[in-house]
Image (cartoon, rainbow, N blue to C red):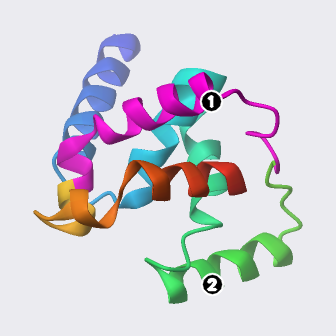
Amino acid sequence: DSDDKLMMASYAGGMSIAYSQVGVAHAVSYGLSYLLGTKHGIGNCIVFNHLEEYYPEGVKEFKLMVEKNNIDIPKNICAGLSDADFNKMIDVSLGMKPLWENALGKDWEKQMTREKLRLLYEKL
């Protein structure tokens, strides 16, 4: 019975995220999860830590919380990846079209290019 409830709660949560304003971090973190197996929540933290361009106040507050609580966010997780690896992560991330549109608007493809996404992944 509790497994059934957990499954339905997970489904409802997933559906609400899929069609809501989840932001840039979610779309980018899917590439990390797909290629590197990064847990989605940790991936969101790794990505969000570098999104000052999109969320300057939120990232500032996030970094203060990380420091205050002595949280270790993984760094350099994309170091040593091949061009093929980066391209796979980029393909996965850009495939999250509803997430990008929710985060950046209908012209999101003009704002988030493959090159810009590659530079972001290289920072992680």
Asked which quadrant contains residue 97, the reply is top left
Instruction: Determine contact: label 2, label 1, CB under 8 Å.
Output: no
> CA separation, marks 2 and 1?
33 Å
The residue to which callout 1 is attached is 83
Query: In the image, 3: left or right of 60?
Result: left
44 vs 8: above or below: below
116 vs 67: above or below: above
Q: Nearer the viewer, mark 2 or mark 1?
A: 1
- Tell me residue 12's x, y (percent): 22, 34
SS at mark 2 in the image: helix
Q: From which residue to which does the magenta span run?
A: 75-100
Asked which quadrant contains residue 109, the reply is bottom left
- Tell me residue 31's x, y (percent): 50, 34
Viewer-side residue, 87 vs 46: 87
Viewer-side residue, 30 vs 12: 30
The residue at 89%/67% (across/down) is 70
The residue to which callout 2 is attached is 61
Determine the residue located farthest toward the bottom in the rendered image.
57
Q: Earlier in the sequence, mark 2 or mark 1?
A: 2
